[in-house]
Image: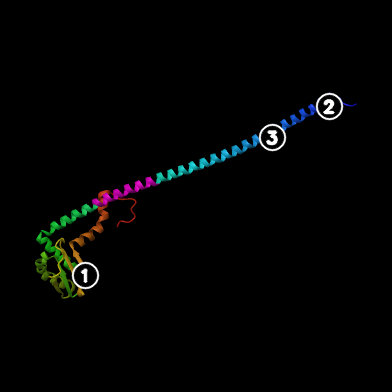
Amino acid sequence: MALSDGDVQKQIKHMMAFIEQEANEKAEEIDAKAEEEFNLEKGTLVQNQRLKIMEYYERKEKQVELQKKIQSSNMLNQARLKVLKKREDHVRSVLDEARRRLVKSVSNVSLYRDIMEKLILQALYQLLENEVTVRAREADQELVNDIFPSILVKYKETTGKNLTLRLDTENFLPAETCGGVELTSTGGRIKISNTLESRLDLIAQQLVPQVRNALFGKNENRKFLD
């Protein structure tokens, strides 16, 4: 049977409605899939950025912590250096006081005479030379000449050797020197300094560890005593 125009129009409308419905459903499906993919991509991007931000602040925290440790270490080292400086200054003040007392001892003529004789003899026993030149302060010339005979006798008694002593009257020890002598032989090639300063420095090197212990107590971290 032939369809009437009305029936044809109805079928066309029905088909158009069906096609439109299919298109809408397909569009909704595409939209839903696109939304899902968008959310997944957005979630991935957000997570990645969150991780980057966390890593950034973790690095910052580590840097800050490291800077704190470095600053704390520097401050601790500076404090230790200041303490050591104060301690060394105190030790130096003790040695300076010893030097001042040493200068005062020179004013005792009989004591200084005995010290000078022992200093010269000690140096002579180290040299063991037949001819020796003695340098002293200009102010000590008379004293040194006076003790030469006694020194020659004691040297002969101890070593069994004769000795020629000469006082250098051209090259004196500096006037600011506390005292003592300097002995030379073989044309000045061998020299022994036995000034009071040199003896004090030698004794100080040996006694400084004991002075530190007396002043500040034993340092448990010190491995060497020099």
What's drawn in magenta, residue-wise? Answer: 70-90
Q: Image point 24% across, 56% down: which residue?
A: 207
- Which secondary structure type mostly characterizes the magenta part of the structure? helix
- Name the residue beneath numbered marker 1: 191
Q: Image point 26% across, 52% down: which residue?
A: 88
- Name the residue beneath numbered marker 3: 30
**Residue flagged by tag 1: what amino acid is it?**
Lys
For marks 2 and 1, the one nearer the N-term is: 2
29, above or below 150, in the image: above
63, above or below 126, in the image: above
Specify the color scheme: rainbow
Q: Give the SS element for disc 2.
A: helix
Which mark is on residue 138? Answer: none
- Name the residue beneath numbered marker 2: 8
User: Which of label 2 and label 3 is nearer to you?
Assistant: 2
**Residue flagged by tag 3: what amino acid is it?**
Ile
